[in-house]
Amino acid sequence: MSGSKSIKIIVLGIIVAIGIAATLLLSVNMEQDRTDTNSSNVTQTETNMPNPITNTVITINNTSQEQYFYKLENSINAKLMPDAPINKEVLAGHVFGFTADNRLSGGMSVVTIKNQDEKLSIRFTAKFSGELTKLHLYFNGKDEINAKVGLQEDKQGVPSGQWLGDSPGYTQTMVNSNATKFDTIELLENINVKENTIYHIVIDIDEDPESRFFMITYHDNWPFTPFNHIDPDEVWEDNAINTLFFDGSTWLVQDKWPIYVIDYSDGTSDGQPYSLMAPWVIKKSSTVGQTIRPYSNYLVDEFAFVVSLNGSPLDNLYYAVYDEENTILRSGTFATPDELTKKKSWHQVKLESPLLVASGELYHFVLSSPDTDLENPYKVYGHEFMLDQTLGYGSVNHYLTKSQNELSWSKWYDADTAFKLITK
């Protein structure tokens, strides 16, 4: 990126999925990188990513950038979104947005298996009915592990102990234990689930790990999944979703948000696809925020992002709301330097007057700080590295956006900010 005063080259494993998960190793010029290590010794790199559309040429499985984004915007999951706008009653004070904030902590979490008597479970509520074909899971460890992986019904909050499907019901597989990629597990035939029914993805290893074996989770649990094909402006409540650990005698709830995607035979998918919360740097010409295309009419009175700062920024943090014609609908000061700290926090601002965002129309809610430099920048936080970008908040109708000139806007389909729009 131009204007960078500290350039480092790093390799990131970027996971994209259209029907199946694919791994890319992308070497990029970074303006800034910061590595956090959580208490479980899983390393997470928080970084200001380059613009994937306007500044970077990418190919995915020999597919051109234009073909890839065309396929993404016209994927099966995107088509599951309602064709007509939703007209619903929206009360004052309603929060429209992606409120998961990683408890304002850094890093991912893990659940560890030390021996073959221990097991793991991802508990979830199926959002569709149908036959499952694949599981996409996320493990970490030094060695490959031979494991049984499959689905079981729920029995009073824990796995029933009976594998679903034709005998033996589970898939015998080598789990890669490679933190740079997700495991794709082909299921046996006749693994059927029913909509609004609770299930468990069970991982039962057949051997003691030589060193360590982790299932990676997305920090503390959240009682919803991001994708909602009935009302894309809302997360989808799932009070059952969680990660469980079997210690050899008892199943124990871990209160960790599982990272998983399940594929159905008709091409649809379901799950919690995010794997990381990271900051995007705001300084000079870098403008970052959230693009939305709401399915209902909202009268927005206030909005909020998760933000922080480094050092002493030389300028305030400003907000603007743009429409699809790039007309500025609202603008003002989002925060002054003395209102923020280096720790992430929600910051909320009241618009100068309520703004009607209309169903089906596109809006950019963005932050900028033109006179702030790289040594003392602001940061806005988002969720990224999705297993399946059509399963993110609002599917492909909502996404994190970035601009270097406030004229052209990038589409970060694999990321969403933590944001709130509060209605009048």
Image (cartoon, rainbow, N blue to C red):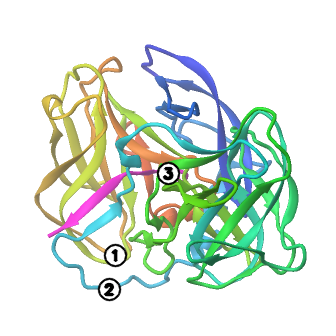
Viewer-side residue, 239 vs 379: 239
Per the image, the residue denoted by label 3 is: 411
| Dot placed on the residue nearer the N-terminal end, 1 or 2 | 2
- Tell which tag, 2 or 3, sits nearer the viewer: 2
Q: Residues within 10 Å of mark 1 (few under 14, many from 20)?
A: some
Helix, strand or loop under label 3: loop
Callout 1–callout 2 Cβ contact below 8 Å: yes
Range drawn in magenta: 412-424
The answer to whether residue 95 is left or right of residue 240 is left
Q: Quadrant of residue 261?
A: bottom right
Q: Residues within 10 Å of mark 3 (few under 14, many from 20)?
A: many
Mark seen at residue 359: 1
Residue type indicated by callout 2: Asn
Residue drawn where x is 77% and y is 67% of the image: 150
Where in the figure is residue 406, as x and y percent of width and height? 34, 43
Where in the figure is residue 129, as x and y percent of width and height? 66, 84
Per the image, the residue denoted by label 2 is: 87
Q: Residues within 10 Å of mark 2 (few under 14, many from 20)?
A: few
Where in the figure is residue 196, as x and y percent of width and height? 56, 83
Residue type indicated by callout 3: Lys
| Dot placed on the residue nearer the N-terminal end, 3 or 1 | 1
Gap between marks 1 and 2, in whole Å?
A: 8 Å
Viewer-side residue, 395 vs 91: 91
Gap between marks 2 and 3, in whole Å?
A: 26 Å
Viewer-side residue, 220 vs 386: 220
Where in the figure is residue 308, as x and y percent of width and height? 29, 34
**Quarter of the image with the C terminus in it:** bottom left
Helix, strand or loop under label 1: loop
**Can you see residue 203?**
yes
Residue drawn where x is 25% and y is 73% of the image: 298
| Dot placed on the residue nearer the N-terminal end, 2 or 3 | 2
